[in-house]
Image (cartoon, rainbow, N blue to C red):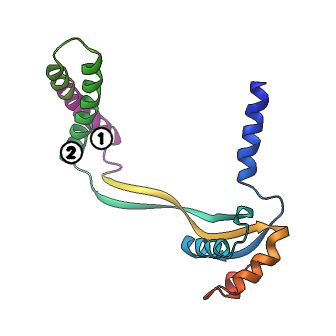
Amino acid sequence: MDCMSSQQNARALKSGLTLEFPQSLGVYDKYEQAQRSVDFLSDHEFPVENCMIVGTELKQVERVTGRLTTGRVALGGLLSGIWMGLFIGLIFSFFGTGEATAIIVATVAFGALFGVIWALVGYAATRGHRDFSSVSRIVATRYEVLVEHKHAAAARELLATLPGHTASQQNF
């Protein structure tokens, strides 16, 4: 019985991310434009549960945030270690029988030392091949609004009345 309900849950989740016979209402360069179209449909009482916004043409964007130096790496490891030591110290102090302050101070000190060592070893292992810090994310280049085929005509009629919505945004 458990296996059966788990399969039903998986099917329900999958069906929530698919449409039976989707048709395109438009392709947009920005997510906000696609969202605006679906929001407009919703404002006009269109059954938007039959719509999907699909990001296409994915690309990874990496923003370089700074140069890594031994000092910056050590400082990052120190701060990270302090937080981890504080967290572990608080947990130990709740369940331990000793002095809470002593436990917290000891785990913070140990965490700080461990954090610095771990960060510097990791940095040394790169041998200068990545001497910068960055943040990255996957973004879509285009966003397509899809709708169940049985609602496509009504959705297109409504979107035709959306101010600023042009036929060039439509892909059908």
Mark 2 Cα within 10 Å, few/some/many (few <14, many 20+)? Answer: few
Could you tell me which residue is drawn at 15 percent across and 23 percent down? 101
What residue type is disc 1 on? Tyr
Q: Measuring 27% from the left and 38% from the top, which residue is drawn there?
A: 80
Q: Is 100 left, or right, of 171 in this rendering?
A: left
Q: On the image, which quarter does residue 147 sit in?
A: bottom right
Give the side of residue 125 with respect to residue 149, left or right.
left
Question: Percent x, y for residue 124?
Answer: 29, 39
The one nearer the camera, 126 or 35, is: 35
Question: Residue 117: x, y in percent?
Answer: 24, 31
Among numbered discs 2 and 1, the one appearing first in the sequence: 2
| Type of secondary structure dominating the magenta stretch | helix
User: Mark 2 — residue?
Assistant: 70
Queried whether the magenta region covers residue 48, the answer comes back as: no
Can you name the residue that lies furthest to the front here? 45
Q: Give the range drawn in magenta.
A: 109-130
Q: Residue at x 73, y 67 (%)?
A: 47
Label 1, on which residue? 123
